[in-house]
Image (cartoon, helix red, strand yellow):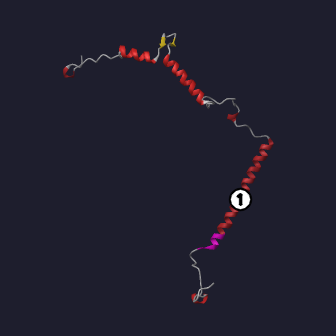
Amino acid sequence: MMQQGHTEDTHGELHHEASDVDSGRILRFGVWFVVVLAVVYGVVWVIFGAFDRREASGSVRDFPLSAERSAMPPQPRLQMEPRQEMRALRQRDQELLTTYGWADREAGLVRIPIERAMQLTVERGLPVREPAPAAAPGGARP
């Protein structure tokens, strides 16, 4: 529906701004874009065809580092049951901290419970270094 008083004739000749959009350049860009895509597609198709022929011929060698595969990965491995392993570790640590035993039988080192070690430390005290001899007055050393 047209509004009253507004017709095509009242505006005279209508034109667009010629400097806004160059439709020819946009069309040329689109054409070149399609051409470049076609060339890239063709190159990729040729390369994958060459890969397929090479693999079918059996001339593909194994990756050199994969030749010496072992059944198990190197240490450290993932934990299969971390909660049980943590429980066993804490139990082992608790046993070491609360029981008597040999730390190194050949060297004569024993392990004592930590509570007993703290009692002995309180009773005997910690070792103290002898104070360094005082320097002679005047900065001269003996």
Residue located beneath label 1 in the image: 39
Could you tell whether 46 is left or right of 99 in the image? right
Could you tell whether 59 is left or right of 33 in the image? right
Q: Position of residue 49 (x, y in %)?
A: 77, 50
Residue type at mark 1 is Val
- SS of the residue under disc 1: helix
Q: Nearer the viewer, residue 50 or 84?
A: 84
> Which corner quadrant holds the N terminus?
bottom right
**Residue shown at 56%/27% (left/top)?**
86
Q: Position of residue 4 (x, y in %)?
A: 58, 88
In magenta segment, residue 140:
no
Query: Splitting the image into 4 quarters, where does residue 141 fall?
Result: top left
Q: Which residues are magenta?
A: 21-27
Q: Of helix, strand and loop, which mostly describes the magenta segment?
A: helix
In magenta segment, residue 22:
yes
**Residue shown at 49%/17% (left/top)?**
98
Q: Nearer the viewer, residue 16 or 59?
A: 16
**Residue shown at 67%/65% (left/top)?**
32
Q: Position of residue 44 (x, y in %)?
A: 72, 53
Query: Splitting the image into 4 quarters, where does residue 12 fall?
Result: bottom right
**Residue shown at 47%/16% (left/top)?**
113
Could you tell whether 118 is left or right of 85 in the image? left
Q: How busy is the neighbourhood of tag 1: few (under 14 within 10 Å), some, or many (20 plus)?
A: few
